[in-house]
Amino acid sequence: MKTIARIYNDFTEKFGVPRQSGIVNAVQSQIVFEPECRNIDAVRGLEGFSHLWILWSFSQNRHNEWSPTVRPPRLGGNERIGVFATRSPYRPNAIGLSCVKIESIDLRCPHAPIIIVSGADLVNNTPIFDIKPYVPYADCIPEATGGFTDSVPRKQLKVQFADGVAAAVPAEKMQSLIEVLATDPRPAYHNDANRIYGMSFANLNVSFRVNNATVEIIAVVNG
């Protein structure tokens, strides 16, 4: 499959990227088409839809082999589940599927059309194979069940800053950073209150630790 577009956002590394789409909506991303697909006629009519499906590549997956079972973070990283019962990147074909919200479509910029979306769970510069509109009458299934994900509540942490640290975060990035850390980007099996983690986000190097249900941001420096 050929790459038709790439996504650009503040997730400069895998660590910190939301584990599912639609979880962190404060972060906006740009879908920029490759030159051969850069035609405003190709998105004609898309303005009538609110959401998109994105078919993309796990381009930073360094594992060449796949496993029939994986350990989902949702289950604490300790229980093995069949890979086809999960959305793990370690699959025979490293292809991701995400649903994102269309915020706007820029038809006037030099690289038009550019689609601005929110809720993406893709790292910056991820190759995109295709986009398709989300169609509620066919794609929304109210009676659907979520397997093991239904039995595990989604973790949402409280985020606080150490004294004087918040001033280092640009105002326009504050809510995005808080929402990203509130989802707890640590590996599911980590539970050391004294361990300090580092994350790159929006050209910032963020250091934090987690104690019980609270994330404390202890340092922020420009990347």
Image: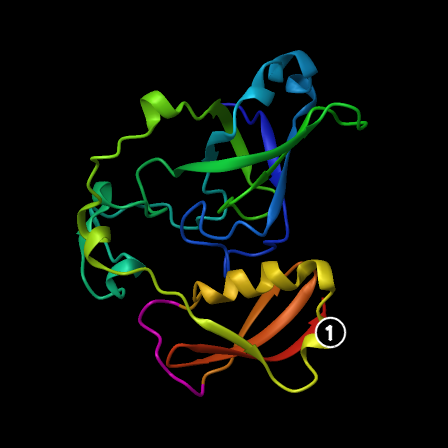
For this view, does 12 lie left or right of residue 221?
Answer: left
- Which picture quadrant has residue 33? top right
For this view, does 79 lie left or right of residue 77?
Answer: left
> The C terminus is located in which quarter?
bottom right
Above or below, 102 against 210 in this view is above
Locate residue 152, reporting x and y percent.
23, 60
Instruction: Tell me if residue 74 is in the magenta stretch.
Output: no
Rendered residue at 58%/25% (across/down): 4
Above or below, 216 against 144 in this view is below
For this view, does 211 lie left or right of residue 173?
Answer: left
Q: Give the range drawn in magenta.
A: 187-194
Q: Which amino acid is tagged 1?
A: Ala
| Label 1 element class | helix
Relative depth, front residue between 40 and 178: 178
Rendered residue at 18%/62% (across/down): 79
Rendered residue at 55%/27% (across/down): 3
Give the residue pinned by disc 1: 168
Rate crowding at label 1 as few (under 14), some (14 to 19) or many (20 or more) other CA atoms within 10 Å.
few
Locate residue 143, reporting x and y percent.
20, 35
